[in-house]
Amino acid sequence: MKQLPDNAGFLPRDRSWHPDALTPAYKTSVTRSPQKALLSFPGGLGEQSGPDFGHDMLGPLDNDLILNFAKTGEMALGPRIIVRGRVIDQHGRPVPNCLIEIWQANAGGRYRHKNEGYQAPLDPNFGGCGRTITDGDGAYEFRTVTPGPYPWPNGMVDWRPAHIHFSLIGHAFSQRLITQMYFEGDPMILQCPIVGSIDHKEAIESLIATLNMAEAVPMDARVYTFDIVLRGRRQTFFENRWEGL
């Protein structure tokens, strides 16, 4: 068989990169993992033909979690950070017009959710969610605060490391990817049972944002860089898709 160049179609990748659906140390996977063989259903026209995103749908503070839920003249509490990066494909080409949504706990490790069980205080000026659209170079940026770690009812003393949830939507409703971003140097990453379900060191490393003090804003915010790669052998690890966007 003739060897195709690297830029021909999608690069193949090892599906063992993804952990097993059933990983008992992550207790929720016991009830969430499939009990029967999976079925494939064709996508409908609505799933394949939209959505159509444009920058006119975004508010001026949608990507600024420090201010987008705050009262006038107030700000969210916590160490201020900027999270920026690029969404690229397996060949390094930019992916423009990709809607990115994030959600996270506040600086004390608490989510603004009615079923939240952690008793850390809510920040009245922090909603915990934001969105943006990648530009022509695939670049994105969020301003936020460092989320705190928090306990969760998996084991007696299990805690989630500080993290930010990412959702990416491509050019169709069926093209949605979900992942989590962790922070460089956090010793709790490798103690997390969810992270522990990932067998490959490289896959875990693809979820860790790099501290970039060269771009820090003086007297304001540190900067973390988190590039997202779709498909291919360098793909960022995603929770819900083996094959990428």
Image (cartoon, grey):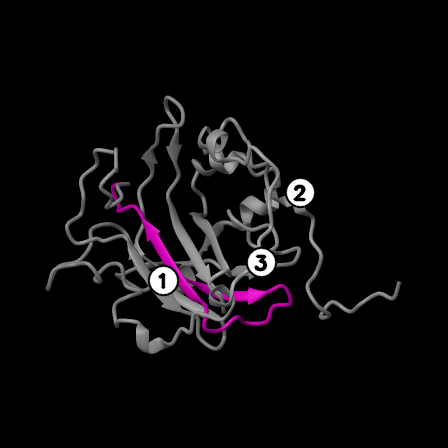
Q: Mark 1 near mark 2, Cβ–Cβ under 8 Å?
A: no
* Disc 2 crowd, CA 10 A, few/some/many (<14, 14-19, 20+): few
Element marked by disc 1: loop
Residue 11: quadrant of the picture: bottom right
| As drawn, 157 above or below 101 | above
Q: Please give left or right for residue 20 compared with residue 226 in the image.
A: right
* Span colored in magenta: 84-108
Q: Residue at x 38, y 76 (%)?
A: 54
Q: Is residue 89 magenta?
A: yes
Instruction: Tell which circle, 2 or 3, labels the residue nearer the N-terminal end.
Output: 2
The quarter in which the C terminus is drawn is bottom right
Q: Residue furthest right?
A: 1
Q: Nearer the viewer, mark 3 or mark 1?
A: 3
Q: Secondary structure at mark 2?
A: helix
Q: Residue furthest top?
A: 156
Q: Position of residue 238 (x, y in %)?
A: 52, 50
Task: Left or right? Give the position of 82 relative to 210.
Answer: left
Identify residue for label 1.
Answer: 216
Image point (37%, 59%), residue name: 101
Task: List x then y, in percent, for residue 134.
Answer: 44, 70
Q: Residues within 10 Å of mark 1 (few under 14, many from 20)?
A: some
Viewer-proximal residue among 8 and 34:
34
Q: Which residue is mark 2?
A: 16
Q: Nearer the viewer, residue 192 or 35?
A: 35
Residue 113, given in percent of the width and then of the height, sits at 24, 44
Q: Is residue 66 left or right of residue 90?
A: left
Can you identify the residue that label 3 sits on? 42
Looking at the rendered structure, the kind of residue marked 3 is: Pro
> Which sits earlier in the primary sequence, circle 1 or circle 2?
2
